[in-house]
Amino acid sequence: MTNFVGLFQSQCMLKKIAHKIIYEQTAVGFKATLDFNSQQVWAEASTKREAKRKVHELALALLVNESGYSERSHCPHITSLVDNIGVANIPEYLIKSSENSSDHNLSELAVTLFQSIESGSFQAYSEFKRILKVRGYKTHQDGGGSIHIWRCV
């Protein structure tokens, strides 16, 4: 599951946007209201935690729609793609031709990683490698258009 709270907070920090969340108990559970950037978003759920997740998901979508992702420190976009695909669903060999995959997220991940490698910045690839390491995987980029991914034992 994507960490919408963390992604939203990271985006606010990078964009220097102040935000505030308020919880109210309702008949069905909880209502979370999030104020940021002169806007207000709210969501209801049976638990406080779920209301918090939902309101951050809505706020992140609105924020990204208005100003795009900021990726200066860490790459929330890479984290989001890996979360959406699922580490176990990423193929053992991610090859440059994966850019034509029928899975939109996998295709976008491949494009982003290979652009990062080819540009020489390696920022997105380094973040991808870090994310997978935390989740028990290793990666190796062979320079020939493929990235080998395997589970550490």
Image (spheres, rainbow, N blue to C red):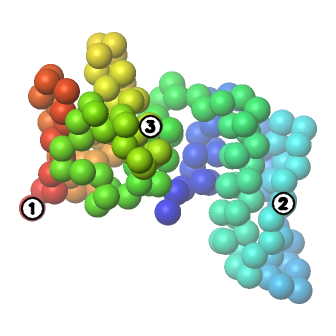
- Separation of disc 3 and disc 2 at Cα? 30 Å
Residue type for callout 2? Trp
- In the image, residue 36 lies at what x, y percent? 82, 42
Q: Residues within 10 Å of mark 3 (few under 14, many from 20)?
A: some
- In the image, residue 122 lies at what x, y percent? 31, 22
In this view, the mark in front (3 or 2):
3
Q: Earlier in the sequence, mark 3 or mark 2?
A: 2
- Separation of disc 2 and disc 1 at Cα? 43 Å
Tell me whether circle 2 and circle 1 mark residues in contact (CB < 8 Å): no
- Regarding residue 125, the answer to whether it shows in the image is no
Q: Is residue 42 above or below residue 76?
A: below
Question: In the image as oriented, which residue stretches furthest toward the left?
Answer: 153
At mark 2, the secondary structure is strand
Residue 134 relative to residue 150: left or right: right
The residue carrying mark 1 is 153
At mark 3, the secondary structure is helix
- In the image, residue 46 lies at what x, y percent? 74, 81
Residue type for callout 3? Glu
Pick the residue in front: 125 or 114.
114
- Separation of disc 1 and disc 3 at Cα? 29 Å
The residue carrying mark 3 is 108
Tell me what residue is drawn at x 42 percent, y 49 percent.
Answer: 103
